[in-house]
Amino acid sequence: MKSLPYVVLLALVLGTLAFPPRNCPASDSTQIVYQPLPKPGEKVLIDSDHYFTYGFDKPPKIGVVIMRVEVFARDGQQDTSFIVRGDADMPSMRGAHSTGDKDFSLSAKGVYLLPVRLVMPGDWEIRLTFLKKGEVIFRGAYLFDL
Ligand SMILES: [Cu+2]
C-alpha cells in the first residue's frame, strides 16, 4: 500500500491545523518580571504615590534572617494598606530551596516582617510582591551572595 505514508502525513497536517500548539505565556511564571532592587535601606518607588524601604534584622547569613519592609505614602506617612509577599530561592538552583510566596505579617508598629531561611552559601534572590485590593502593584527582586 504505497499511499499509506501520504495518508499518515495528511492526518498529521490536518491534526496540526485543527489543534494548533497553544502558546500561553501568561501561565509561564518565568515571564513575570521582577525589577532589580537597590541595596537595603534605599527608597524604592512602588507607584507614583508610594515607596518602600527594606532591610534585615542582621546582615544575612546562613540561618533565619528577618526581612523587614516599610511602606510610605509620598508625604512620608506610613502606609499599611498593602499586602506584601516574599519568596526566597537560589537562582542557580531554582526551586531547590524555594520557600514559596509567603505573606509578610504586619507588626504593631506597621512594619512588614517575614522570616527568611537561608540554608547554604551562594547566590540568593528574594522576590517581593506588593498587592493592593488583590492586584499586583509592584514586583522586585533583591539579589545577593551569601
Ligand atoms: Cu542551594
Image (spheres, rainbow, N blue to C red):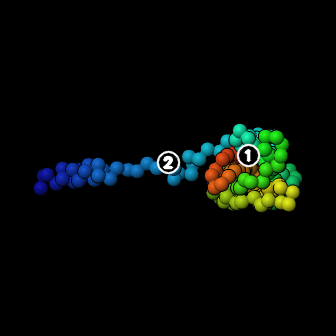
Q: Position of residue 56 (x, y in %)?
A: 84, 52
Whether the residue under disc 2 has CB within 8 Å of ligand 1? no
Comparing labels 1 and 2, the label whose residue is closer to the camera: 2
At label 1, which amino acid type do we have? Tyr
**Pointer 1 residue:** 142
- Give the side of residue 12 with respect to residue 114, left or right: left
Q: Amino acid at mark 2?
A: Pro
Residue furthest to the left in view is 1
Q: Position of residue 46 (x, y in %)?
A: 71, 43
Q: Residues within 10 Å of mark 2 (few under 14, many from 20)?
A: few
Q: Which residue is rendered at x = 43% and y = 48% of the image?
A: 23
The residue closer to the viewer here, 131 or 133, is 133
Determine the CA span between mark 1 and mark 2: 24 Å
As drawn, is 9 to the left or to the right of 114?
Answer: left
Q: Secondary structure at mark 2?
A: helix
Is residue 22 left or right of 105 when viewed as pictured? left
Q: What is the total number of numbered labels drawn onto the structure image? A: 2
Residue under pointer 2: 25
